[in-house]
Image: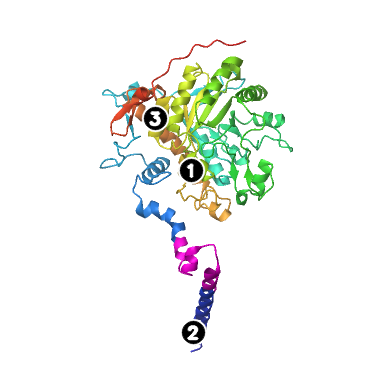
Amino acid sequence: MMRDVLSYGLGTLIGFALMLVVLFLFVSDITQKKHGVLRSYPVIGHLRYFFEQLGEYFRQYFFSGDRDEMPFNRATRAWVYRLAKNEGGVIGFGSTYDLRQPGALVFVNDPFPVLDEERLPTPSLALGEGYCKLPFEARSIVNVSGMSYGAISAPAVRALSRGAALGGCWLDTGEGGLAPYHLEGGGDLIMQIGTAKYGVRDPQGNVSPERLMELAKVVKAFEIKLSQGAKPGKGGVLPGRKVTAEIAQIRGIPPGRDSISPNRHRDIANVNELLERIAWLRELTGRPVGVKTAIGGWRFMNELGDAVHRKGLEFAPDFLVIDGGEGGSGAAPQALADHMGLSIDEALPRVVDALIEAGLKQRIRVVASGKLVTSARAAWALCVGADFVNTARGFMFSLGCIQALRCHTNTCPTGVTTHQKRLQRALVVEEKYLRVANYVNNMNREIDMIAHSCGVRHARELRREHVRIVQAGGQSTALNMLYPYPEPKPRVRVA
Protein backbone atom coordinates (compact mmCIF):
# COMPACT_ATOMS: atom_id res chain seq x y z
CA MET A 1 0.00 0.00 0.00
CA MET A 2 2.77 2.41 0.97
CA ARG A 3 4.63 1.57 -2.28
CA ASP A 4 1.55 2.44 -4.31
CA VAL A 5 1.19 5.76 -2.50
CA LEU A 6 4.85 6.58 -3.12
CA SER A 7 4.59 5.62 -6.79
CA TYR A 8 1.47 7.73 -7.19
CA GLY A 9 3.13 10.67 -5.46
CA LEU A 10 6.27 10.36 -7.59
CA GLY A 11 4.21 10.14 -10.78
CA THR A 12 2.24 13.22 -9.77
CA LEU A 13 5.47 15.10 -9.03
CA ILE A 14 6.99 14.16 -12.39
CA GLY A 15 3.80 15.12 -14.19
CA PHE A 16 3.69 18.46 -12.41
CA ALA A 17 7.34 19.09 -13.27
CA LEU A 18 6.66 18.32 -16.94
CA MET A 19 3.71 20.70 -16.92
CA LEU A 20 5.96 23.43 -15.51
CA VAL A 21 8.57 22.78 -18.20
CA VAL A 22 5.93 22.92 -20.95
CA LEU A 23 4.46 26.10 -19.45
CA PHE A 24 7.90 27.69 -19.26
CA LEU A 25 8.64 26.76 -22.89
CA PHE A 26 5.23 28.07 -23.97
CA VAL A 27 5.74 31.44 -22.33
CA SER A 28 9.37 31.63 -23.47
CA ASP A 29 8.52 30.75 -27.07
CA ILE A 30 5.52 33.03 -27.45
CA THR A 31 7.38 36.05 -26.04
CA GLN A 32 10.73 35.63 -27.79
CA LYS A 33 11.33 37.56 -31.02
CA LYS A 34 14.11 35.60 -32.68
CA HIS A 35 12.26 32.59 -34.16
CA GLY A 36 9.01 33.13 -36.04
CA VAL A 37 8.12 29.42 -35.99
CA LEU A 38 8.24 29.29 -32.19
CA ARG A 39 6.08 32.41 -31.82
CA SER A 40 3.41 30.86 -34.04
CA TYR A 41 3.75 27.29 -32.75
CA PRO A 42 5.11 27.41 -29.18
CA VAL A 43 6.55 24.17 -27.76
CA ILE A 44 5.83 21.92 -30.77
CA GLY A 45 7.84 24.28 -33.00
CA HIS A 46 10.99 22.92 -31.37
CA LEU A 47 10.46 19.70 -33.34
CA ARG A 48 11.27 21.60 -36.52
CA TYR A 49 14.73 22.55 -35.26
CA PHE A 50 15.27 19.09 -33.79
CA PHE A 51 14.59 17.35 -37.10
CA GLU A 52 16.57 19.96 -39.02
CA GLN A 53 19.59 19.26 -36.83
CA LEU A 54 19.30 15.49 -37.18
CA GLY A 55 18.45 15.55 -40.89
CA GLU A 56 22.03 15.71 -42.14
CA TYR A 57 22.93 12.65 -40.07
CA PHE A 58 19.87 10.56 -40.95
CA ARG A 59 19.98 11.22 -44.69
CA GLN A 60 23.16 9.22 -45.18
CA TYR A 61 21.57 6.11 -43.65
CA PHE A 62 17.91 6.20 -44.69
CA PHE A 63 17.29 8.51 -47.64
CA SER A 64 20.38 9.06 -49.80
CA GLY A 65 21.41 6.59 -52.46
CA ASP A 66 24.85 4.97 -52.45
CA ARG A 67 26.18 7.59 -54.89
CA ASP A 68 24.16 10.63 -53.83
CA GLU A 69 25.74 12.11 -50.75
CA MET A 70 28.30 14.86 -50.23
CA PRO A 71 31.10 15.37 -49.42
CA PHE A 72 31.62 11.60 -49.68
CA ASN A 73 28.89 9.19 -50.68
CA ARG A 74 28.21 5.85 -49.04
CA ALA A 75 29.83 3.82 -51.83
CA THR A 76 33.10 5.75 -51.51
CA ARG A 77 33.14 5.48 -47.74
CA ALA A 78 32.43 1.75 -47.92
CA TRP A 79 35.31 1.35 -50.38
CA VAL A 80 37.73 3.03 -47.97
CA TYR A 81 36.39 1.04 -44.99
CA ARG A 82 36.99 -2.24 -46.86
CA LEU A 83 40.56 -1.25 -47.70
CA ALA A 84 41.23 -0.24 -44.11
CA LYS A 85 39.76 -3.46 -42.74
CA ASN A 86 41.73 -5.51 -45.28
CA GLU A 87 38.51 -6.99 -46.61
CA GLY A 88 39.40 -6.49 -50.27
CA GLY A 89 37.72 -4.36 -52.90
CA VAL A 90 35.63 -7.09 -54.52
CA ILE A 91 31.93 -6.47 -55.26
CA GLY A 92 29.21 -8.56 -56.87
CA PHE A 93 26.50 -8.10 -59.51
CA GLY A 94 28.01 -5.01 -61.10
CA SER A 95 28.91 -1.49 -60.10
CA THR A 96 26.64 1.39 -59.12
CA TYR A 97 29.18 3.82 -60.62
CA ASP A 98 27.50 5.62 -63.53
CA LEU A 99 29.88 5.48 -66.49
CA ARG A 100 27.73 8.02 -68.37
CA GLN A 101 27.91 10.68 -65.65
CA PRO A 102 29.97 13.73 -66.71
CA GLY A 103 33.35 13.58 -65.01
CA ALA A 104 33.35 9.80 -64.63
CA LEU A 105 36.78 8.17 -64.90
CA VAL A 106 37.27 5.37 -67.42
CA PHE A 107 40.72 3.79 -67.51
CA VAL A 108 41.91 2.41 -70.85
CA ASN A 109 42.40 -1.31 -70.44
CA ASP A 110 45.14 -2.87 -72.52
CA PRO A 111 44.11 -5.94 -74.56
CA PHE A 112 47.33 -7.56 -73.35
CA PRO A 113 47.76 -6.51 -69.71
CA VAL A 114 51.01 -6.99 -67.83
CA LEU A 115 51.59 -10.50 -66.51
CA ASP A 116 52.59 -11.11 -62.91
CA GLU A 117 56.14 -11.99 -63.86
CA GLU A 118 56.47 -8.81 -65.94
CA ARG A 119 55.43 -6.42 -63.19
CA LEU A 120 57.95 -4.16 -61.50
CA PRO A 121 57.78 -2.65 -58.01
CA THR A 122 56.73 0.99 -58.09
CA PRO A 123 59.97 2.90 -57.47
CA SER A 124 60.44 5.41 -54.71
CA LEU A 125 61.26 9.03 -55.56
CA ALA A 126 63.67 11.39 -53.86
CA LEU A 127 62.77 14.89 -52.72
CA GLY A 128 65.56 17.45 -52.90
CA GLU A 129 68.16 15.14 -54.41
CA GLY A 130 71.15 17.15 -55.57
CA TYR A 131 69.96 20.33 -53.90
CA CYS A 132 70.08 19.63 -50.16
CA LYS A 133 72.36 17.79 -47.76
CA LEU A 134 69.70 15.31 -46.62
CA PRO A 135 67.34 14.38 -49.48
CA PHE A 136 64.24 12.36 -48.58
CA GLU A 137 63.53 9.06 -50.32
CA ALA A 138 59.72 8.75 -50.33
CA ARG A 139 58.52 5.17 -50.71
CA SER A 140 54.74 5.32 -50.90
CA ILE A 141 52.57 6.94 -53.57
CA VAL A 142 49.78 7.55 -51.02
CA ASN A 143 50.59 9.56 -47.91
CA VAL A 144 48.94 11.25 -44.93
CA SER A 145 48.00 14.86 -45.65
CA GLY A 146 48.40 17.65 -43.10
CA MET A 147 46.09 17.32 -40.11
CA SER A 148 47.12 19.28 -37.03
CA TYR A 149 47.11 17.95 -33.52
CA GLY A 150 44.23 20.08 -32.36
CA ALA A 151 42.10 19.57 -35.42
CA ILE A 152 42.37 15.84 -34.68
CA SER A 153 42.78 14.10 -31.35
CA ALA A 154 45.83 12.64 -29.63
CA PRO A 155 44.67 9.03 -30.22
CA ALA A 156 44.14 9.86 -33.90
CA VAL A 157 47.66 11.27 -34.25
CA ARG A 158 49.12 8.28 -32.42
CA ALA A 159 47.30 5.82 -34.68
CA LEU A 160 48.33 7.73 -37.81
CA SER A 161 51.96 7.86 -36.66
CA ARG A 162 52.17 4.16 -35.98
CA GLY A 163 50.14 3.19 -39.04
CA ALA A 164 52.10 5.42 -41.41
CA ALA A 165 55.36 3.94 -40.17
CA LEU A 166 54.05 0.42 -40.67
CA GLY A 167 52.63 1.26 -44.09
CA GLY A 168 55.80 3.04 -45.25
CA CYS A 169 54.24 6.44 -46.03
CA TRP A 170 54.96 9.91 -44.73
CA LEU A 171 52.87 11.75 -42.15
CA ASP A 172 52.38 15.50 -42.51
CA THR A 173 52.10 17.26 -39.15
CA GLY A 174 49.73 19.98 -40.31
CA GLU A 175 50.28 23.57 -39.23
CA GLY A 176 49.70 22.96 -35.51
CA GLY A 177 53.30 22.05 -34.72
CA LEU A 178 55.08 18.82 -33.88
CA ALA A 179 53.42 16.93 -31.02
CA PRO A 180 55.06 14.04 -29.16
CA TYR A 181 52.36 11.79 -30.63
CA HIS A 182 53.72 12.42 -34.14
CA LEU A 183 56.99 10.81 -33.08
CA GLU A 184 55.44 7.71 -31.54
CA GLY A 185 55.58 5.55 -34.66
CA GLY A 186 59.09 6.52 -35.66
CA GLY A 187 58.14 6.96 -39.32
CA ASP A 188 58.77 9.65 -41.92
CA LEU A 189 57.47 13.10 -40.93
CA ILE A 190 56.97 16.24 -42.97
CA MET A 191 56.85 19.36 -40.82
CA GLN A 192 54.34 21.88 -42.10
CA ILE A 193 55.01 25.55 -41.41
CA GLY A 194 51.78 27.53 -41.45
CA THR A 195 51.24 31.26 -41.49
CA ALA A 196 51.20 31.42 -37.66
CA LYS A 197 54.55 29.59 -37.46
CA TYR A 198 53.19 27.21 -34.81
CA GLY A 199 55.90 24.88 -33.57
CA VAL A 200 58.78 26.83 -35.14
CA ARG A 201 58.43 30.23 -33.49
CA ASP A 202 60.08 31.98 -30.58
CA PRO A 203 58.17 33.63 -27.70
CA GLN A 204 57.71 36.76 -29.84
CA GLY A 205 56.08 34.78 -32.65
CA ASN A 206 59.02 35.00 -35.06
CA VAL A 207 60.66 32.05 -36.79
CA SER A 208 63.29 30.46 -34.56
CA PRO A 209 66.35 29.12 -36.46
CA GLU A 210 67.32 27.13 -33.37
CA ARG A 211 63.94 25.41 -33.29
CA LEU A 212 64.12 24.64 -37.02
CA MET A 213 67.55 23.01 -36.65
CA GLU A 214 66.23 20.98 -33.73
CA LEU A 215 63.25 19.81 -35.80
CA ALA A 216 65.51 18.91 -38.71
CA LYS A 217 66.92 16.10 -36.60
CA VAL A 218 63.56 14.27 -36.54
CA VAL A 219 61.65 15.30 -39.68
CA LYS A 220 62.41 14.40 -43.29
CA ALA A 221 61.24 17.62 -44.98
CA PHE A 222 59.61 20.99 -44.38
CA GLU A 223 56.47 22.25 -46.08
CA ILE A 224 55.61 25.96 -46.24
CA LYS A 225 51.83 26.23 -46.36
CA LEU A 226 50.60 29.21 -48.36
CA SER A 227 46.98 28.06 -48.40
CA GLN A 228 44.76 24.99 -48.32
CA GLY A 229 41.83 23.89 -50.41
CA ALA A 230 39.20 24.29 -47.70
CA LYS A 231 39.89 27.98 -47.21
CA PRO A 232 42.28 29.67 -49.68
CA GLY A 233 43.08 33.19 -48.49
CA LYS A 234 42.19 32.32 -44.90
CA GLY A 235 44.47 31.00 -42.18
CA GLY A 236 43.83 27.88 -40.13
CA VAL A 237 40.94 27.95 -37.68
CA LEU A 238 40.84 25.93 -34.47
CA PRO A 239 37.84 26.81 -32.24
CA GLY A 240 38.71 27.72 -28.65
CA ARG A 241 36.82 24.74 -27.27
CA LYS A 242 39.46 22.53 -28.88
CA VAL A 243 42.51 24.51 -27.70
CA THR A 244 43.53 22.47 -24.67
CA ALA A 245 46.43 23.38 -22.39
CA GLU A 246 48.70 20.88 -24.17
CA ILE A 247 47.77 22.13 -27.64
CA ALA A 248 48.23 25.72 -26.51
CA GLN A 249 51.70 24.87 -25.18
CA ILE A 250 52.73 23.20 -28.46
CA ARG A 251 51.46 26.13 -30.51
CA GLY A 252 52.60 28.85 -28.12
CA ILE A 253 49.15 30.43 -27.69
CA PRO A 254 46.67 30.93 -24.79
CA PRO A 255 44.45 27.92 -23.99
CA GLY A 256 40.70 28.06 -24.56
CA ARG A 257 40.84 30.82 -27.18
CA ASP A 258 40.26 30.52 -30.92
CA SER A 259 43.47 29.74 -32.80
CA ILE A 260 43.26 31.75 -36.02
CA SER A 261 46.29 31.95 -38.28
CA PRO A 262 47.01 35.02 -40.46
CA ASN A 263 45.90 35.02 -44.11
CA ARG A 264 49.48 34.65 -45.24
CA HIS A 265 53.06 34.57 -44.03
CA ARG A 266 54.04 38.06 -42.92
CA ASP A 267 57.57 37.50 -44.21
CA ILE A 268 56.46 36.19 -47.63
CA ALA A 269 54.61 38.71 -49.79
CA ASN A 270 55.58 37.58 -53.31
CA VAL A 271 57.17 34.75 -55.28
CA ASN A 272 60.71 36.13 -54.94
CA GLU A 273 60.42 36.26 -51.15
CA LEU A 274 58.98 32.74 -51.18
CA LEU A 275 61.98 31.37 -53.11
CA GLU A 276 64.41 33.22 -50.85
CA ARG A 277 62.74 31.71 -47.79
CA ILE A 278 62.84 28.21 -49.34
CA ALA A 279 66.57 28.49 -50.08
CA TRP A 280 67.28 29.86 -46.59
CA LEU A 281 65.33 27.08 -44.87
CA ARG A 282 66.95 24.38 -46.99
CA GLU A 283 70.44 25.68 -46.30
CA LEU A 284 69.73 26.03 -42.57
CA THR A 285 68.25 22.56 -42.03
CA GLY A 286 69.75 20.49 -44.83
CA ARG A 287 66.27 19.11 -45.51
CA PRO A 288 64.05 19.33 -48.62
CA VAL A 289 61.59 22.23 -48.58
CA GLY A 290 58.26 22.27 -50.38
CA VAL A 291 55.19 24.47 -50.71
CA LYS A 292 51.52 23.67 -50.19
CA THR A 293 48.94 25.84 -51.93
CA ALA A 294 45.53 25.92 -53.49
CA ILE A 295 45.35 27.24 -57.06
CA GLY A 296 43.02 30.02 -58.17
CA GLY A 297 44.47 30.77 -61.61
CA TRP A 298 47.64 30.54 -63.70
CA ARG A 299 49.48 33.61 -62.46
CA PHE A 300 51.20 31.97 -59.50
CA MET A 301 52.67 29.08 -61.48
CA ASN A 302 53.81 31.34 -64.31
CA GLU A 303 55.50 33.72 -61.87
CA LEU A 304 57.06 30.79 -60.01
CA GLY A 305 58.59 29.36 -63.18
CA ASP A 306 59.94 32.73 -64.29
CA ALA A 307 61.41 33.45 -60.84
CA VAL A 308 63.14 30.06 -60.60
CA HIS A 309 64.80 30.60 -63.97
CA ARG A 310 65.94 34.06 -62.93
CA LYS A 311 67.35 32.95 -59.58
CA GLY A 312 68.48 29.40 -60.36
CA LEU A 313 67.25 25.86 -59.72
CA GLU A 314 68.71 25.90 -56.22
CA PHE A 315 65.92 28.33 -55.25
CA ALA A 316 63.10 26.11 -56.51
CA PRO A 317 60.84 24.26 -54.06
CA ASP A 318 61.68 20.57 -53.90
CA PHE A 319 58.00 19.68 -54.06
CA LEU A 320 54.61 21.32 -54.58
CA VAL A 321 51.51 20.09 -52.75
CA ILE A 322 48.51 21.14 -54.83
CA ASP A 323 45.31 21.19 -52.79
CA GLY A 324 42.00 21.25 -54.63
CA GLY A 325 39.15 23.49 -53.58
CA GLU A 326 37.21 20.39 -52.53
CA GLY A 327 39.74 19.68 -49.77
CA GLY A 328 38.95 20.24 -46.14
CA SER A 329 39.37 18.06 -43.07
CA GLY A 330 39.00 20.94 -40.60
CA ALA A 331 36.90 24.01 -39.83
CA ALA A 332 36.42 26.55 -42.63
CA PRO A 333 34.07 29.42 -43.52
CA GLN A 334 31.40 28.08 -45.87
CA ALA A 335 31.84 30.96 -48.32
CA LEU A 336 35.44 29.90 -48.89
CA ALA A 337 34.87 26.15 -48.68
CA ASP A 338 32.12 26.34 -51.32
CA HIS A 339 33.47 28.92 -53.74
CA MET A 340 37.20 29.60 -53.40
CA GLY A 341 39.93 27.77 -55.29
CA LEU A 342 39.95 25.47 -58.31
CA SER A 343 39.07 21.80 -57.92
CA ILE A 344 41.93 19.35 -58.13
CA ASP A 345 40.49 18.14 -61.47
CA GLU A 346 41.32 21.49 -63.05
CA ALA A 347 44.22 22.67 -60.89
CA LEU A 348 46.45 19.61 -61.15
CA PRO A 349 46.71 19.41 -64.97
CA ARG A 350 47.38 23.13 -65.18
CA VAL A 351 50.13 22.99 -62.56
CA VAL A 352 51.82 20.01 -64.22
CA ASP A 353 51.58 21.72 -67.62
CA ALA A 354 53.14 24.88 -66.20
CA LEU A 355 56.05 22.89 -64.78
CA ILE A 356 56.57 21.07 -68.09
CA GLU A 357 56.53 24.35 -70.01
CA ALA A 358 59.03 25.82 -67.57
CA GLY A 359 61.28 22.75 -67.78
CA LEU A 360 60.88 22.17 -64.03
CA LYS A 361 58.90 18.94 -63.89
CA GLN A 362 61.94 16.83 -63.03
CA ARG A 363 63.19 19.35 -60.49
CA ILE A 364 59.92 19.82 -58.56
CA ARG A 365 57.92 16.83 -57.35
CA VAL A 366 54.14 17.24 -57.49
CA VAL A 367 51.84 16.02 -54.71
CA ALA A 368 48.10 16.02 -55.43
CA SER A 369 45.50 16.49 -52.70
CA GLY A 370 41.72 16.98 -52.64
CA LYS A 371 39.19 14.13 -52.14
CA LEU A 372 41.59 11.57 -53.64
CA VAL A 373 40.53 8.86 -51.21
CA THR A 374 40.16 5.92 -53.62
CA SER A 375 42.73 4.13 -55.74
CA ALA A 376 40.95 5.19 -58.95
CA ARG A 377 41.16 8.88 -58.08
CA ALA A 378 44.80 8.47 -57.01
CA ALA A 379 45.62 6.67 -60.27
CA TRP A 380 43.96 9.54 -62.18
CA ALA A 381 46.33 11.97 -60.41
CA LEU A 382 49.34 9.89 -61.50
CA CYS A 383 48.03 9.87 -65.07
CA VAL A 384 47.84 13.66 -65.00
CA GLY A 385 51.45 13.92 -63.82
CA ALA A 386 51.46 13.85 -60.03
CA ASP A 387 54.29 12.01 -58.30
CA PHE A 388 52.47 11.44 -55.00
CA VAL A 389 48.99 11.67 -53.52
CA ASN A 390 48.09 13.12 -50.13
CA THR A 391 44.79 12.41 -48.43
CA ALA A 392 43.44 13.52 -45.06
CA ARG A 393 39.84 12.35 -45.04
CA GLY A 394 40.75 8.97 -46.49
CA PHE A 395 42.87 8.34 -43.42
CA MET A 396 40.14 9.77 -41.19
CA PHE A 397 37.80 7.13 -42.60
CA SER A 398 40.43 4.46 -41.92
CA LEU A 399 40.41 5.62 -38.29
CA GLY A 400 36.66 5.07 -38.11
CA CYS A 401 35.23 8.48 -39.16
CA ILE A 402 31.53 8.14 -40.06
CA GLN A 403 31.18 11.61 -41.66
CA ALA A 404 29.15 12.93 -38.73
CA LEU A 405 30.11 16.49 -39.82
CA ARG A 406 30.99 17.50 -36.24
CA CYS A 407 34.74 18.02 -36.72
CA HIS A 408 34.63 21.64 -35.53
CA THR A 409 32.33 21.06 -32.53
CA ASN A 410 34.62 18.86 -30.37
CA THR A 411 31.83 16.24 -30.23
CA CYS A 412 33.09 13.74 -32.83
CA PRO A 413 31.37 10.42 -31.93
CA THR A 414 34.29 8.28 -33.17
CA GLY A 415 37.06 10.10 -31.28
CA VAL A 416 38.90 11.31 -34.39
CA THR A 417 38.45 15.07 -33.97
CA THR A 418 37.47 15.49 -30.32
CA HIS A 419 39.46 16.21 -27.18
CA GLN A 420 36.78 14.88 -24.84
CA LYS A 421 38.29 11.85 -23.11
CA ARG A 422 34.94 10.07 -22.99
CA LEU A 423 34.54 10.29 -26.77
CA GLN A 424 38.21 9.51 -27.45
CA ARG A 425 37.64 6.05 -25.96
CA ALA A 426 35.95 5.14 -29.25
CA LEU A 427 39.33 5.26 -31.03
CA VAL A 428 41.46 2.33 -29.88
CA VAL A 429 44.99 3.06 -31.15
CA GLU A 430 46.08 -0.60 -31.03
CA GLU A 431 43.30 -1.46 -33.49
CA LYS A 432 43.14 1.63 -35.69
CA TYR A 433 46.84 1.95 -36.51
CA LEU A 434 46.61 -1.41 -38.30
CA ARG A 435 43.73 -0.04 -40.38
CA VAL A 436 45.83 2.98 -41.32
CA ALA A 437 48.59 0.66 -42.55
CA ASN A 438 46.06 -1.53 -44.38
CA TYR A 439 44.64 1.51 -46.14
CA VAL A 440 48.08 2.66 -47.34
CA ASN A 441 49.13 -0.78 -48.52
CA ASN A 442 45.83 -1.59 -50.25
CA MET A 443 45.65 1.82 -51.94
CA ASN A 444 49.15 1.36 -53.37
CA ARG A 445 48.30 -2.21 -54.38
CA GLU A 446 45.10 -1.19 -56.20
CA ILE A 447 46.85 1.70 -57.96
CA ASP A 448 49.37 -0.82 -59.27
CA MET A 449 46.50 -3.12 -60.28
CA ILE A 450 44.99 -0.32 -62.38
CA ALA A 451 48.41 0.35 -63.92
CA HIS A 452 48.91 -3.31 -64.85
CA SER A 453 45.44 -3.42 -66.41
CA CYS A 454 46.44 -0.40 -68.50
CA GLY A 455 49.46 -2.34 -69.77
CA VAL A 456 52.26 -0.65 -67.83
CA ARG A 457 54.67 -2.33 -65.44
CA HIS A 458 54.16 -0.04 -62.45
CA ALA A 459 52.10 2.95 -61.40
CA ARG A 460 54.72 5.59 -62.24
CA GLU A 461 54.41 4.66 -65.92
CA LEU A 462 50.77 5.82 -66.05
CA ARG A 463 50.19 8.65 -68.54
CA ARG A 464 47.29 10.82 -69.63
CA GLU A 465 46.41 8.50 -72.51
CA HIS A 466 45.58 5.80 -69.96
CA VAL A 467 42.42 7.49 -68.68
CA ARG A 468 39.31 8.98 -70.29
CA ILE A 469 36.89 11.51 -68.83
CA VAL A 470 33.16 11.31 -69.60
CA GLN A 471 31.81 14.58 -71.03
CA ALA A 472 28.39 16.22 -70.85
CA GLY A 473 26.98 14.20 -73.77
CA GLY A 474 27.88 10.88 -72.15
CA GLN A 475 30.85 10.24 -74.44
CA SER A 476 34.37 9.97 -73.02
CA THR A 477 37.45 11.88 -74.15
CA ALA A 478 41.05 10.87 -73.51
CA LEU A 479 42.76 13.03 -70.91
CA ASN A 480 45.67 13.71 -73.27
CA MET A 481 43.15 15.23 -75.69
CA LEU A 482 41.60 17.42 -72.98
CA TYR A 483 45.05 18.41 -71.68
CA PRO A 484 47.67 17.77 -74.40
CA TYR A 485 51.22 17.59 -73.11
CA PRO A 486 52.80 21.01 -73.70
CA GLU A 487 56.23 21.64 -75.16
CA PRO A 488 58.91 23.13 -72.85
CA LYS A 489 59.40 26.81 -73.60
CA PRO A 490 62.94 27.92 -74.39
CA ARG A 491 64.24 30.19 -71.63
CA VAL A 492 67.36 32.22 -71.17
CA ARG A 493 68.52 32.72 -67.62
CA VAL A 494 69.03 36.37 -66.79
CA ALA A 495 72.23 36.99 -64.84
- Mark with earlier residue (2, 3): 2
Q: 327 left or right of 309? A: left
Measured as percent of width and height from the top left, residue 264 is found at 62, 34
Which residue is at 35% across, 53% downward?
63
- The kind of residue on which mark 3 rests is Trp
Direction right: furthest residue: 204
Q: For the residue labelled by badge 2, is the local secondary structure a helix, a strand or a loop?
A: helix
Instruction: Categorize mark 3 by other alpha carbons within 10 Å: few (<14), some (14-19), many (20+).
Output: many
Q: How is the image coloured?
A: rainbow
Choose mark 1 or mark 3, whichever is in front: 3
Between label 2 and label 3, give the one nearer the viewer.
Answer: 3
Q: CA distance from mark 2 to mark 3?
A: 70 Å
Q: Which mark is residue 396?
A: 1
Q: Earlier in the sequence, mark 2 or mark 1?
A: 2
User: Crowding near pointer 1: few (<14 within 10 Å), some, many (20+)?
Assistant: many
Magenta region, residue range: 24-50
Quadrant for the C terminus, please. top right
Look at mark 3 in the image and give the residue it sits on: 380
Mark 2 sits on what residue?
8
State the image coordinates of residue 390 (x, y, percent, origin top left): 49, 33
Q: Is residue 130 visible?
A: no
Which of marks 3 and 1 precedes in the sequence?
Answer: 3
Q: Horizontal placement of 475 versus 246: left or right?
A: left
**Towards the viewer: 51 or 255:** 51
Q: CA distance from mark 1 to mark 3?
A: 21 Å
Question: Residue type at mark 2?
Answer: Tyr
Question: Of residues 278 and 306, which is closer to you in this image?
Answer: 306
